[in-house]
Structures are given as structure tokens and as C-alpha cells.
Amino acid sequence: MPELPEVEVTRRSFALKIEGARVRSVRLGQPLRWPLGCNGEDLIGRRIASVRRRGKYLLLDFEQGMLLIHLGMSGSLRFMDSLPPAGKHDHFDLVTTQGVLRLHDPRRFGAVVYASSESDPVAIKLLGHLGMEPLGQSESSFALLVFIKELKHRNASIKQVLLAGDVVVGVGNIYASESLFWAGIRPATRASRLTRPKIERLRSAIIDVLSKAVERGGSTLRDFSNADGESGHFQMDAMVYGRQGQACKACGTLIKQIRQGQRSTFYCPNCQVG
DNA sequence: ATGTAAACCTGTGCGC
DNA sequence: TGCGCACAGGTTTACA
């Protein structure tokens, strides 16, 4: 489910409510992708200082230590005033003095991992290889020259390089197809073959698509919702994702669907020529 | 070093 | 109504 926009929308929907809270208790459900890495009781009494995002990870900062939260394919977070009974797929509850943060994740590809700091080996393992932040504070966080340099020596298709996350983070299967549409680039084009103007267009497209998606509350294909339970609407703005066989909104050509690395890719054969 | 497939797990929708 | 299969927003892991 969650790509950068969904994670960022989730973050914004509960960060202010949870900041300053202290942990009262922790409940663990079925195992997630990785073990928590500490005892739930070890977190009791800790104060939550801030909620940040790095790529598709949420970072819940304590005054000492942090939780790295990943939503995997099917995860979503809710922040609630009370503590309702846990459902079958509710696998983590952080009960705090200001409310309950609950992870709902049917497929359990998600994770909640404790790290003592950002230099903790487990944090390095999960975050260390991540690429540039497309929606970072400064212009330099997603530097064009770095983008060009990184793509130059990549022989894989541009779609797969975007998904890999080691050049730029946060672009998943929906937004990779959407960004490539706006940049006018064929998804199967080798990254190393892209011209500088195309790469400039791609960088802008990624920033624009992700920003727009955040504004629209993310994409709700089946079950995504933010920490208040609200759905996103960006799927309505999709130009190509999930639109195989339908007319391109820009030119009327039928949208194609192909397979790249076991994932579906969608594109317009007329608008995307490079 | 880079590229590709399999793996993790559950639910849903479709053809028969 | 049931069964089997393909597929789903991600990422690590093992192996060419």
C-alpha cells in the first residue's frame, strides 16, 4: 500500500497529537517482518519527542532511542483516544498518555523496530542504503547532478531503478508509473540511456506527483487510510496506474500494462516515447 | 557491483 | 458455492 505520500499523510495525521506523550504500555500481536528488538516494557515511561519520516519509514523519536515503523504492503496506523479490542490484524499497540497508536497490517510485511539511535546497527541496516529524499527541505536533498550521476551507471530499466530506492526514496509502484508518464519516459528505458533533459523532467515529475498525492491524502486503492481513518483520493488523478485498456486522459491512446521485475507497470505508448 | 527471482503473508476477485 | 490461481501499495535475501 503505502508509498511516500501515504506515509507522509499518516505522519501528519498523528504527529502533533502524540508528541509529548509518554508510553503507558505496549501490546504485540502476531510477528511482523522483524522483531521489535527490545521488550515492550522497556519503552514504558519514555517520552515521544517527534515523529519524522525517512523514505517510507516513520521514525518515532523518544528522548532516548527511537522506533522505526514501516507499513509494508498492507499496513496502516490509527491514532485513537481509547483502546478498542484488538482485531485479528492489529499487531502493535503503543498506548500513550495522549492516545493509542495502533498498527493494522493483514499481510504483516510491515515492521516496528527499536533502535537506540540512528547509528544503531539496526537503523543502519534499514536506513543506511536509502537514496535521496524527493520532498526534502532543501533543493539539495534531491540534487539533480547526483540524480544524473547515479542513473548514468545503472543498466536496469528506469522503472526498476526508481523502485529500488537507493537513488531516490519513496517512489513505489503507483508513483513510479505516474512520474514516468509526466516525464514522457518509457518505463523500460535503461536508466543509463536517459538524456539530461529527460532526467530533469523526471526529477520534476517525481516531486510534483508526490507533492500532489500528499495534498490529496494519498491513494486509497482498497484500504489505505490515515491515522484518523480517512481515505486518500489521488487514485482519481492517476493518469496510467491501473488504467490498462482505457483511453489516455491526455491523448486517447489505450494505456498499456507490462510486467517489470514481477510488478505491473502502466504507461501510454503515445505520450511516453523516450 | 549490479541485476533478477524468490521469499515473506493474507485477502480478494476471477474463471471454471 | 467451492476451488485454484493470479495478483496486490514493499523490501530483503540469495544467487547468477
Image (spheres, coloured by chain):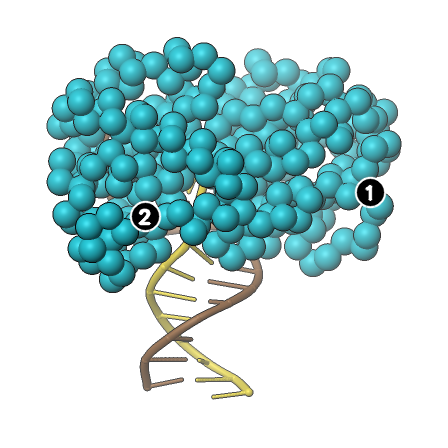
Chain colours: A cyan, B brown, C yellow
Q: Residue at x 72, y 27 (%)?
A: A16
Which chain does the numbered disc 1 sit on? A
Dot 2 or dot 1, earlier in sequence: 1
Of residues A184 and A61, the one drawn nearer to the viewer in this rendering = A184
Can you give x and y, in whole percent of width and height, for residue A90 in the image?
69, 51
Residue A58 in the figure: left or right of residue A26: left
Residue matched to label 1: A81
Amino acid on which the number 2 mark rests in the picture: Met
> In the rendered view of the protein, which quadrant contains the C terminus of chain A?
top left
Which chain does the numbered disc 2 sit on? A
Q: Residue at x 65, y 36 (%)?
A: A13
Of residues A225 and A162, the one drawn nearer to the viewer in this rendering = A225
Q: Quadrant of residue A242?
A: bottom left
Q: Quadrant of residue A197?
A: top left
Q: Looking at the image, is A101 positioned above or below residue A264?
A: above
Amino acid on which the number 1 mark rests in the picture: Asp
* Residue A124 appearing in the image: yes
Q: Residue at x 81, y 55 (%)?
A: A85
Residue matched to label 2: A239
Asked which secondary structure carries label 2, the reply is: loop
Residue A213 in the figure: left or right of residue A74: left
Residue A207 in the figure: left or right of residue A225: left
Q: Quadrant of residue A199?
A: top left
Say few, some or many: other residues with alpha carbon within 10 Å of mark 2 (under 14 / 14 to 19 / 20 or more): many
Can you give x and y, in whole percent of width and height, for residue A190 in the image?
17, 33
